[in-house]
Image: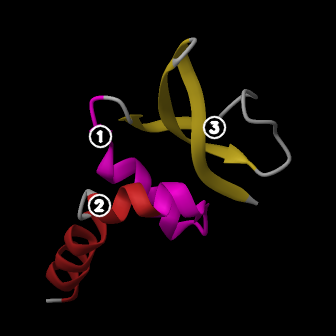
């Protein structure tokens, strides 16, 4: 099973995180399938690769609670609803 979760990067006391698609059995710093975003909690910046995230969600990937909250704050799910409604028409 694949999950969308955070991978810690950066220096000591200045953590930044990559949002990655990774196998459930891998550890936090393990090998990821693909990098799909970036989150900096200090500067409160988020950078998302929307097509890649949509691809993994459509294939059944589950975001962790933290990643879900980051996506919700970035209004990702509103964009997804618009995209899906556009494709249905």
Q: Please give the residue where the numbered disc 1 appears in the rendered image.
A: 46
Q: Which residue is mark 2?
A: 73
The magenta stretch is 43-68
The residue carrying mark 3 is: 33
Q: Is residue 4 left or right of residue 40?
A: right
Q: Secondary structure at mark 2?
A: helix
- Could you say which quadrant of the image residue 73 lies in? bottom left
Label 1–label 3 contact, CB within 8 A: no
Image spot of residue 88 (x, y percent)? 22, 88
Task: Name the quadrant of the C terminus.
Answer: bottom left
Q: Is residue 33 left or right of residue 80?
A: right
Magenta span includes 56 = yes
Observer-side mark, 1 or 3, equals 1
Residue drawn at x 59%, y 28% as measured from the top left:
8
How many numbered marks, from 0 up? 3
Secondary structure at numbered mark 3: loop
The answer to the question of whether label 1 and label 2 lie on touching residues, with beta carbons closer than 8 A, is: yes
């Amino acid at each position: 099973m694949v999950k969308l979760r955070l991978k810690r990067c950066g220096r000591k006391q200045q953590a930044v995180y990559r949002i990655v698609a990774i196998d459930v059995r891998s550890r936090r710093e393990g090998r990821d399938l693909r990098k799909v975003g970036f989150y900096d909690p200090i500067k409160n910046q988020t950078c998302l690769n929307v097509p890649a995230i949509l691809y993994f969600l459509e294939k059944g990937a589950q975001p962790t609670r933290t990643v879900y909250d980051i996506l919700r704050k970035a209004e990702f799910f509103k964009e997804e609803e618009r995209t899906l409604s556009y494709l249905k028409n």
